[in-house]
Amino acid sequence: MSHTAIVTGATSGFGDAITRRLVAEGWRVVATGRRRDRLEALVEALGGPDRIHPLVFDVRDEAATKAALASLPEPFADVSVLVNNAGLALGTGPAQDCDLAQWKQMIDTNVTGLVTVTRLLLDRLIATRGMVINLASIAATWPYPGSNVYGATKSFVRQFSLSLRSDLSRHGVRVTSIEPGLAESEFTLVRTGGDQAAYDALYRGADPLQPEDIAETVRWVVSLPPHVNINSVEIMPVSQSWGPLQVHRRTPV
């Protein structure tokens, strides 16, 4: 396997940590995102353009995505690992109070953007007998109040990963769905519209997962022999587990 990876959403959180970890392991990385300044800072911090190649585009923009991926220079063209990390959650309220535009933005990013990048790179990944790693969530399996469309998009990511695995196994392409639980990152500030108090309350005393924990999981998956496929990894902090199912009881009349 060649050692070039593409990491989408590399400008913060999991994507930033995954990029840093792979470069530290000797990989060349194509780091993508919408914020040019953060990508340029990554290039400077991680050894310059021989180690990391920045691509500035929004995965929701199909034309920009196609143009960016078509522009890869030769040293970075033989992609062997795609890490589909770009994604977001917006809002924490019940479905009936949600903003339809935010629902559509989550679908466009977490579903449509992910499948666009994947389809555009599949021929390269087949040629290198490579790997697709999709960042899903425990929300793909475990619903909770307020997860509504976000959880549904991550269920898509999980099932898409399994279906890709079925189609690509004869080509030697591996597919893994990584499904984190409570993890501390900028993700929560985006979800709450920048509410620092809500961010602090969510993580206080919980010892949540850190982006570096997810980066280590990615490093482990890509380091395995080519005959080994990890179908999915559900990962939570020790402090997080399951509670009883909620039961709504009518007020006696």
Image (cartoon, helix red, strand yellow):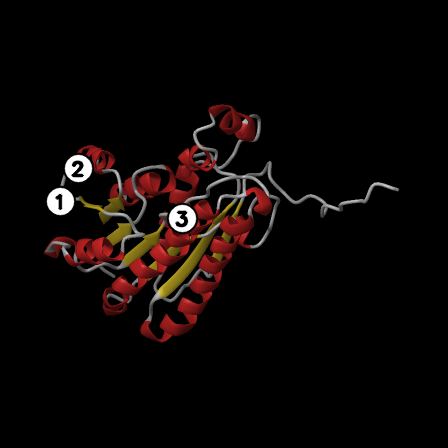
Query: In the figure, 56 relative to 121: above or below?
Result: above
**Mark 3 to mark 1 CA distance (whole Å):** 34 Å
Q: Residues within 10 Å of mark 2 (few under 14, many from 20)?
A: few
Pinpoint residue 127: horizontal percent, then vertical percent.
23, 69
With 85 as the anchor, is 136 left or right in this view? right
> Dot 3: what SS?
helix
* Nearer-the-camera pick, 228 or 83: 83
Q: Quadrant of the N terminus?
A: bottom left
Pinpoint residue 22: horizontal percent, then vertical percent.
29, 45
First in residue order: circle 3 vs circle 2: 2
Pinpoint residue 106: horizontal percent, then vertical percent.
43, 49
What residue does disc 1 label?
50
Q: Which residue type does callout 1 highlight?
A: Asp
Say if mark 2 contacts mark 1, CB within 8 Å: yes
Q: Which residue type does callout 3 highlight?
A: Gln
> Dot 1: what SS?
loop
What residue does disc 2 label?
47
Q: Which residue type does callout 2 highlight?
A: Gly
With 116 as the anchor, is 182 left or right in this view? right
* Nearer-the-camera pick, 251 or 148: 251
Residue at image coords 50%, 49%: 150
Residue at image coords 38%, 43%: 215
With 242 as the anchor, is 2 left or right in this view? left
Farthest bottom residue in view: 170
> Dot 2: what SS?
loop
Say if mark 3 contacts mark 2, CB within 8 Å: no
What residue does disc 3 label?
105
